[in-house]
């Protein structure tokens, strides 16, 4: 049985990923700060109280999962705040870095003992972190944090290659969740696309940056 770990699983894209992985028969391990009725209804094994910016919390999770194999690790937890040049809140920018860029590294490093040959690590990034694709500016913290996590993934791909672990960056599209004020494609569609993408990518694709619909994205 395939074992999948999803962070930020109580709502949004993470919740829908748990639903869809569970529905097809995968063993789903869902992590969240606080669970939700919807998450409980998926039947996932829930690890609550998991704050991705907190070392102790992530080490506790690693301890709880020690000795188990993770086939797919989805780093999904993330935040978006909106900064403009005239409204630069540096603490908010730092917070996005902590959650969006540093935490996927912290979580993947802490759980690396559970990853083995054939395991996949998916980081839910954004095309807003693409330098080439930035044609409109603004969103300083979000763009910076997603650009940073993109290079995290590339380094992880190199560092985990010898162990047969692949690492992918996937942009889900604009998805109707709390993050976007519920504008965009339904989370069901985004999660279905993400599952297809994760399934279709292999070791030869490790360290690459994708749109969930199947296009390779520019850095
Ligand atoms: P939501 O705002 O709906 O959900 C965010 C999730 O992240 C929640 O489960 C939230 O938990 C969790 N989270 C946030 N901060 C922390 C933290 N410090 N520790 C643990 N969990 C945390 O967003 P989406 O589902 O839309 O976003 C999921 C991912 O997809 C993010 O990485 C986002 O950047 C990315 N993405 C989303 C797009 C979109 O259009 N929606 C587009 C491109 C990328 P809690 O309920 O406890 O706050």
Image (cartoon, rainbow, N blue to C red):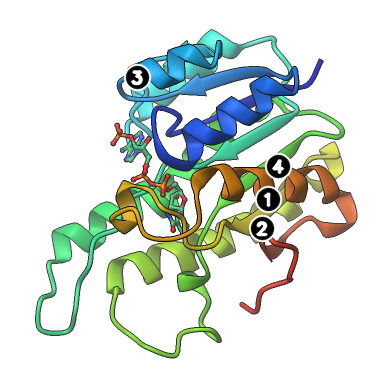
Where residue 67 sits in the image (x, y, percent)?
69, 9
Q: Which residue is mark 2?
A: 212
Q: Which residue is mark 3?
A: 36
Q: Earlier in the sequence, mark 3 or mark 2?
A: 3
Element type where label 2 sits in the image: loop
Calculate the distance from the C-alpha at mark 1 to the C-alpha at mark 2: 5 Å
Q: Earlier in the sequence, mark 2 or mark 4?
A: 4
Calculate the distance from the C-alpha at mark 3 to the C-alpha at mark 2: 26 Å
Q: In the rendering, which numbered label is found on residue 195?
A: 4
- Point out the quarter of the image occupied by ligand 1: top left
Element type where label 1 sits in the image: helix
Calculate the distance from the C-alpha at mark 3 to the C-alpha at mark 4: 22 Å
Element type where label 4 sits in the image: helix
Mark 3 CB in 8 Å range of ligand 1? yes
Q: Nearer the viewer, residue 104 or 158?
A: 104
Disc 2 crowd, CA 10 A, few/some/many (<14, 14-19, 20+):
many
How many numbered circles are shown?
A: 4
Q: Residue at x 53, y 84 (%)?
A: 133
Q: Earlier in the sequence, mark 1 or mark 2?
A: 1
Q: Earlier in the sequence, mark 3 or mark 4?
A: 3
Badges 1 and 2: C-beta atoms under 8 Å apart?
A: yes
Element type where label 3 sits in the image: loop
Calculate the distance from the C-alpha at mark 2 to the C-alpha at mark 4: 8 Å
Q: Is 43 positioned to the left or the right of 46 in the image?
A: right
- Quadrant location of residue 146? bottom left
Q: Which residue is mark 1?
A: 193
Badges 4 and 1: C-beta atoms under 8 Å apart?
A: yes
Q: Residue at x 19, y 79 (%)?
A: 84
Q: Is 89 positioned to the left or the right of 158 in the image?
A: left
């Amino acid at each position: 049985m395939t074992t999948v770990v999803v962070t930020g699983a109580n709502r949004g894209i993470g919740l829908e990923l748990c639903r869809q992985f569970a529905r097809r028969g995968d063993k789903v391990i869902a992590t969240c700060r606080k669970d939700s009725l919807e998450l409980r209804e998926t039947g996932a094994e829930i690890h609550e109280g998991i704050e991705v910016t907190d070392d102790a919390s992530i080490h506790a999770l690693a301890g709880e999962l020690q000795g188990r194999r993770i086939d797919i690790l989805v780093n999904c937890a993330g935040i978006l705040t909106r900064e403009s040049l005239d409204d630069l809140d540096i603490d908010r920018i730092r917070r996005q870095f902590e959650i969006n860029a540093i935490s996927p590294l912290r979580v993947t490093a802490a759980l690396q003992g559970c990853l083995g040959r054939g395991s996949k690590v998916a980081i839910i990034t954004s095309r807003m972190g693409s330098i080439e694709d930035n044609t409109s500016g603004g969103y300083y913290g979000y763009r910076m944090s997603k650009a940073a996590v993109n290079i995290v993934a590339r380094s992880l791909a190199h560092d985990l290659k010898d162990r047969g672990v692949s690492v992918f960056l996937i942009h889900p599209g604009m998805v109707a969740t709390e993050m976007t004020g519920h504008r965009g494609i339904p989370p069901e569609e985004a999660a279905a696309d993400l599952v297809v993408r994760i399934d279709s990518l292999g070791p030869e694709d490790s360290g690459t940056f994708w749109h969930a619909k199947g296009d390779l994205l520019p850095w």
